[in-house]
Image (cartoon, grey):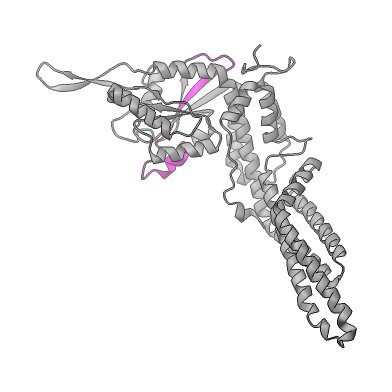
Amino acid sequence: MRASDPTHTCEGGPSTLKRCLQLLEQWRAELHLTPRETTLLAGNLKALERQLDRLAQRRLRVAVFGRVGVGKSSLVNALVGEAVLATDVAHGCTRQQQAVPWPIAVPGLTGVDLVDTPGIDEVAAAGRARLAARVALQADLVLLVLDGDITRVELDALEALRDGGKPVLPVLNRSDCWPPHELDALLQSIQRRLPNGMVAPVAVAAAPRQAVRLEDGRVRSRAMAARIAALATGLQQWLEAQGPALLALNALRQAERLQQALEAGRLKRRRQAAQGLIGRYAALKAAGVAANPLVLLDLAGGLACDTALVVQLCQLYDLPMGGPAARRLLQRLSGHNALIGGAQLGIQVALSGVRQLLLVAAPFTAGLSLAPAAPVAMAQAVLAVHTTHRTGRLTARWLLEQRGRGRRSQPQPTSLLKRLAWQDATLGRLLMAWPQRRDRSGLRELLP
């Protein structure tokens, strides 16, 4: 059996889909949420439960996504082979999501649903645009339907989908409206504007019409047979090769989004407590530095304070902090503080030297040399406060970036995805082709 087979088994174990379902159900059962978290994450939880149900049923969803009036419903009808969805010459005929079974057989799956979505650019229908985006993110594969050169609205939507790691296939509808030489130029223009690595758009005509002259001389349009063979054949072959892996990938990504939302919420709720914790350690460190004249003791005490602060921040945020994670954090802190740390050390040594000279000179100056000692000690204290706050913020930032990475005894979705991708070459290729960009929006609001 080839390693790229979507149902490839490892040493006689369960298929990727079955193994994925088992791991996610175990992770979900061990996800201890407070009543408040359950309420706040109700939408994420419902989305995950629906995806787990589809994973158990092996039923894949393909969202047909795009602007108003590009022929999304007509494309679904053409793929299905009958007019199951309403179409109209007026834009915005689709008011809510509609799922239609696609009568094809895909090995490893029990069925495929085509999901028609409302347009993403209706001026007075922001709610429908949000619905379309949500449906697309919950789908396993997205067909981005165009009817001309790609617009800024479509590029923005494509970027959002790619940020979420969502596989997208571009489709150019109404290709019958373009002469052959203009159609080739249009396809090349779309390809140039698409992000690197994306497949070339497929040209289709979901509901072509031909002008005919009646006996009385009037000209009318007549419906013609849909020209979607290239898309239908290519899409079916693609699903046969990667369909089960797409289903598993989306389930794991849904779990990742839930985990990230959970950890972000915990960070936000603990932000005030973290500020107080950092403030207390900063005050303790500053008092010790100001009172102690020996630089080596200052450095040792400062290191002890920073270490204790890191440990307590991890406990406060209730985020995993094992041995390897601790080493990565220390490397991260060292990298961030490498340049400034040397300067701070030099300043601390210089300030400590000045203080010791002032103390030594005190008997010879009748105590007058002690007058500048207070400002020097204050400067050392301010420096200690700055380094403590910096350590605390860097630790909190690192914890936020580690969302989804749990202890080895309780693997989180990110580690589960990597494990399954290593076992299934098809899933691994999908993960590399459609990486998820970590959402760092609002990071400043989460930091203490």
Residue at horizontal 86 percent and vertical 70 percent from the top: 292
Q: Is any part of residue 110 visible from this angle?
A: no
Give the left or right position of residue 165, taking residue 186 as reference.
right
Specify whether residue 118 is painted magenta: yes
- Determine whether, in the image, residue 309 is placed left or right of residue 233: right
Q: Which residues are magenta?
A: 103-132
Left or right, 429 with reference to 287:
left
Give the image location of residue 185, x and y in percent: 34, 27
399 vs 79, nearest the viewer: 399
The residue at 14%/17% (across/down) is: 214
- The residue lying at 48 percent from left, 15 percent from top is 104
**Quarter the C terminus occupies:** bottom right
Q: Position of residue 83 (x, y in %)?
A: 36, 21
Quarter of the picture holding the N terminus: top right
Q: How many marks?
A: 0
Residue 309: quadrant of the picture: bottom right
Residue 46, image x, y percentages: 59, 36
Left or right? Give the position of 76 relative to 241.
left
Residue 352 in sight here: yes
